[in-house]
Image: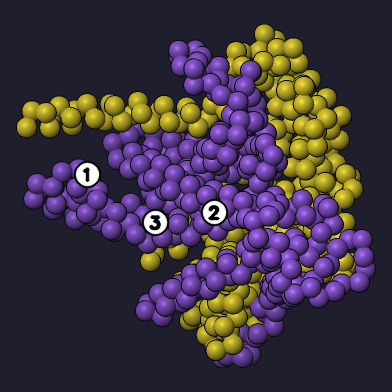
Amino acid sequence: MNNKTYPYYFSLGAMLLYVLLLVIPGVAGIAYAFTDWNSYDSAVHFIGLDNFRKVFSGENMYVSFIKNTLIFTIATIVLKTVIGFFLALLVNKGVRFRNFHRAVMFMPAVVPMLIVGLIFKSVLHPDTGLLNEFLLTIGLGFLAQHWLTDLNFAFKSIIGVDVWKGAGYIMVILLAGLQSIPKDYDEAAEIDGAGYWRRIWNITIPLLMPALTVTLVLNMLYGLKVFDTVYVLTNGGPGYATEVLFTGVFKEFSMGRYGLGTALSTVLFVFMTIIGYFVVKVMSREEDSH
Amino acid sequence: MSTNRRLRTYMPWGKNVLVWIISLITIAPLILIVINSLKDSAQASSMGMDLPTSLHFSNFKTVFEQGKLAGSLWNSVLYAGVSTILCVLLASMAAYVYARRKSRLNRFSYLFMLLGLAMPLNYFTLMKMMQLLHLVNSQLGIIILYAAVQIPLSVFILYGFVGGVPKELDEAGIIDGCGPIRLFFDIIFPLLKPAAVTVFILAFLNSWNEFLLPLYFLNSASQWPMTLSVYNFFGQFQMQWNLVSADIVLTSLPVVIVYLLGQRFIIAGMTAGSVKG
């Protein structure tokens, strides 16, 4: 009851699509990253490390794309995890209409990022935007900013919008984690006289580690691939201040500089596949222990 | 002691207020759009929280006509719907075989596929591949691409679930003379339904919300899904926020409905694996 009952060809369809459209382009990209492939010339020549030299030399803006991508990733990981964790703690106990609040806080996660971007183009508008008007109304008008065009605020605004969209999602995962922690530990520690924050720090967080790891991985994979948020809100501007890897890649694509764009993509491909390798390794080890 | 008791009495009250404030902050931008989608263009130009002086449901009709929404609505339904069905079918068959027969090859195949959870797309070489397969600027092409992108996550969720379906059922089926295809479709697949629904909803939402893939791989406006049309519409009608808002409402409505109906499944899927550990 093996080969015949569970034939390998059942899995071929999924494998074929996966290999043809994800794996082969990714791996072939590594090869093309060493060429001058572009849209003006049908011939493709090997040019060694030139593309990578351009990416990393610092003469061009590419290093800042990578830097921005990393800043975005780290900032959103920290903010979404911290906010998501506190939301989960808040909603977990002692709140009425818990399911309602959970549903509302999760809602931004299902709305297309593109739409969220458009909505916040209005909310963050310097003259008519909801945020500045709100700040004026409560007497904090001096805090009003040109959120998306000011060099000092554009990238922070993008991160803020992304956190608004993603924190509820992280909350839901952490909430599920919280609810799987047996109450006994917490109660025992309380009887022993441990205060609220001490119990959070010494009991809740260690027991929440599996869920926190998952949110870390999810946020990281998402952050490194960010595109829609930046594209809609600032399209990389002002100047190149908010340009990330995938918006940079899209611009290379539009300009027909395929070799260089492929080199940029390959940097991300290699980096993320290595992360993926370790994630898969940990996951398969866990499975073996079951 | 007394401060402790006071905290206990008042904390839930403070907590509830805080939760309401956070919920309001979360929902305010969405409500803003709904309110403004019903205003006339003069009133909507300030994009405030003030209620519409009169209700302009005609905005939705205008958007449908000028934004050619009917076409892109159909495209979105077609792309998200068909690719999701394809993805659920292929992913559940693969997950079933991988989970049931843990040979070296199957185990390697499964883990290899999980790498796809992290792998970013290379749009340049993917474009070349799509050209080779004659799938660029084609509706079939974008459907297959959507399905491929969703496969790793879908296989992952379904794989965990197949393990929970008793193997004795397979044996019983075989004794009754089922071939592998009948065994899977008549006996196993119906039992995978909760996970299949979860995967369906997640893949559907992701495909519906997809923006980057059609941006790269669909040139002609008549093939655009809702997300691309709404972006284009925004470019043309930037000054008429009432129309932009109406377009946003129409684009988001389907996913919000799917979300409200399938909330339980979405949360199950999104938390899959995160609490097992």
Q: Is mark 3 on a helix, strand or loop?
A: helix
Q: How crowded is mark 1: few (under 14 residues within 10 Å), some or many (20 or more)?
A: few
Q: For this view, does B181 lie left or right of residue B176? A: right
Label 1 SS? helix
Q: Which amino acid does the dot numbered 1 rest on?
A: Trp
Q: Say if residue A222 shows up in the picture.
A: no
Q: Which chain carries label 1?
A: A
User: What whole-number distance in Å separates the C-alpha atoms at marks 3 and 1?
Assistant: 18 Å
Instruction: Identify the chain drawn in yellow.
Output: B
Q: Which amino acid does label 2 sit on?
A: Leu
Q: How far apart are marks 2 and 1 (CA)?
A: 31 Å
Q: Label 3, on which residue? A: A212
Q: Are marks 3 and 2 in contact (CB under 8 Å)?
A: no
To which quarter of the image does residue B174 belong? Answer: bottom right
Q: In which quarter of the image is residue A252?
A: bottom right
The answer to whether A108 appears left or right of A22 in the picture is left
Residue under label 2: A70
Which one is in front in this view, the residue at disc 3 or the one at disc 2? 2
Dot placed on the residue nearer the N-terminal end, 3 or 1: 1
User: Colour scheme in the image?
Assistant: by chain
**Labelled disc at residue A197:** 1
Q: Earlier in the sequence, mark 2 or mark 1?
A: 2
Chain letter of the residue beneath label 3 in the structure image: A
Could you say where residue B109 lies in the image, as x and y percent from the top left?
A: 60, 80
